[in-house]
Amino acid sequence: MVGSDSPRFPLGRGRLIVCLVWFVSLSCCAMPAWGQVPDLPGWDLVWNGEFDGTSLDTTKWTALDRRDSFNDELQYYHPNQVAVTGGNLELTAINVPRQGKQYQSGLVTSNDLFGPGRFEARIDLPTSQGMWPAFWLNSNHVQWPLGGEIDILENRGSEPHIVSSAYHWQTNPGPCCDQREYVFRNYSATEGGQPVDFHAGFHTYAAEWDETSIRYYVDGNLFYTVPEFSGRPIYETPKNIILNVAVGGFFGGDPDGTTVWPQTMQVDYVRYWQPSSTTGPPVDPPAGVDLLSNPGFDENGGTLDGWTDFGNVIDNVSPNNQLSEGGRHAVKIYGQFNGGENFSGISQGVAVSEGDVLRAEASTHTPSWDTLFGKSNEVTMKVEFYSDFGAGYGSSDFLGEVSQIVHNGSSPENTWLDHSLDAVAPAGAVEARLLLMLRQPGNDNGAVWIDSAGLFLDTSADGDFDGDGDYDVSDALQGQRAGEDLTAGSGWHTNFGTVESQEAGVAAVPEPASLWCLLGVGAFLGAVRRRCV
């Protein structure tokens, strides 16, 4: 929310999926008692707003009364548009003018300031063109955005299937906002082969903020990590918690004839945790989450933010919007045309530990109008390992690499080709570096577009096929579709019903209900497999 204020399932589940879901829903679904805040391993709950009363708790929150807003918004924020009812905070936008503003809406800000920690809210979003709901953190007491703005949730009322998160900062202490910078990422998901509608019911939105990174979650899924880089500090300036529904503005556009009034954002709770004094928060990123920053080259309108380019002597390594696989941009690479062998490309390093199993991914494309087909140029994907973060290739800290040629003169044109490469971090490794490189041995022309880069921790051998840190029916569904072994003795069967502890290498013991699930589902899978033989 700009301004200053005080995973994916394939289609076709089949009978096995239906039966599994039905069985598990009957035998092992348990919800925490109403009103009870569940424990979050690694974190201590220190503040929460549950909105259980009949009015706003003014010891914790202030409802804004303000005519003027930012970002070309059209609302007057007035306390009349803030209510607490039915266990929810309600912020309602209405098509009623006030003091020269065309619309009215609600915004609440916390009275307290909060430092780094975990912030989470359960929210039912409004819909309709012109709505701009947000859950965010801002340092209201300092000049924006010198303290850093953390947008945990933003949504356009016209886009029910997409939510986004962002981080805004400014290193220049001069006036706002010429030096303001930001990064963001959109999130979407599918369930049962259909896109999740974030306007239909409650979803949870969270961010974990520490001195070196911000991690964003939707419904428990970590989908975006913003690490600290040179020129992009992760400020520890204390921040207010803000919830609001803006109307109009440059983010999603203004209301029009299709807009339905009124629109209400409901908030079930807001909670704030700090790292536990004994165990601390998770240190290693979970499996299945892309460790790279800006993997689709879409940040800031199409950039190489987070990446290091090399061999870029004639602007031959650059973001490009002529072709893309998923977002709006890819990186285009071609040779230097210096008459001799040359190498050009991009790289990005991530923190790893000895023994980590990694999977690198990327997609390549060469079009017929700028093709590599029939040429001598070739593209290599590599994972390099180092004992010192940022060390040079071939230095004493270089530990080795795994590489493969992913695109060359025999690769088909006019189609996206998906590639993957597995690697294991050797002893002493602290950095894994993904490198995508075009080799031009002569003066052959032709370019390659690269998109959908990824570097993932891989725990599929343990049965965690969806990479979310637990072993459940979702893993069975994905494993069954991929032809993985789910029988007795397999990783999935052995670990079913457990959840990885926040401390590496420790697993929680299944509750009795989970044990019944394990036995029942295991037998059911065995029976299904026998019938399919």
Image: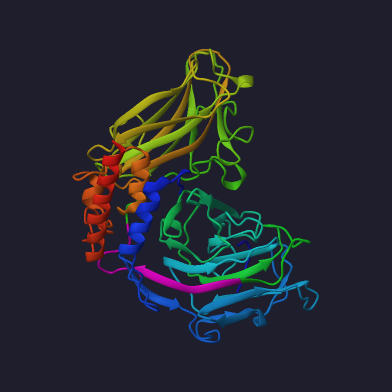
Where 363 falls versus 528 (above or below)?
above
In the rendered image, is residue 28 in sight? no
* Quadrant of the frame with the N terminus: bottom right
Q: Which image quadrant is residue 321 in? A: top right
Look at the image and say whether residue 272 sits in the magenta stretch.
yes
Left or right of 120 on screen, residue 75: right
Residue 258, image x, y percentages: 75, 61
Closer to the camera, 124 or 234?
Answer: 124
Left or right of 166 on screen, residue 208: left
Closer to the camera, 17 or 62?
Answer: 17
Q: Which image quadrant is residue 529 in? A: top left
Residue 469, image x, y percentages: 32, 53
In the rendered image, is residue 480 in sight? yes
Left or right of 124 on screen, residue 249: right
Predominant secondary structure in magenta? strand
Closer to the camera, 141 or 244?
Answer: 244
Q: Residue furthest right?
A: 100
Q: Tell me what residue is drawn at x 39 percent, y 49 percent.
A: 17
Residue 515, image x, y percentages: 22, 60
Q: How many marks?
A: 0
* Quadrant of the frame with the C terminus: top left
Q: Tell me what residue is drawn at x 58 percent, y 62 percent.
A: 199
Q: Residue furthest front?
A: 531
Q: What's the coloring here? A: rainbow
Residue 300, image x, y percentages: 59, 47
Where 492 falls versus 77 (above or below)?
above
Q: Tell me what residue is drawn at x 65 percent, y 74 percent.
A: 92
Where 233 falls versus 348 (above or below)?
below
Closer to the camera, 338 or 90?
Answer: 90
Look at the image and say whether residue 105 sits in the magenta stretch.
no
What residue range appears in magenta? 265-282
Where 368 falls versus 60 (above or below)?
above
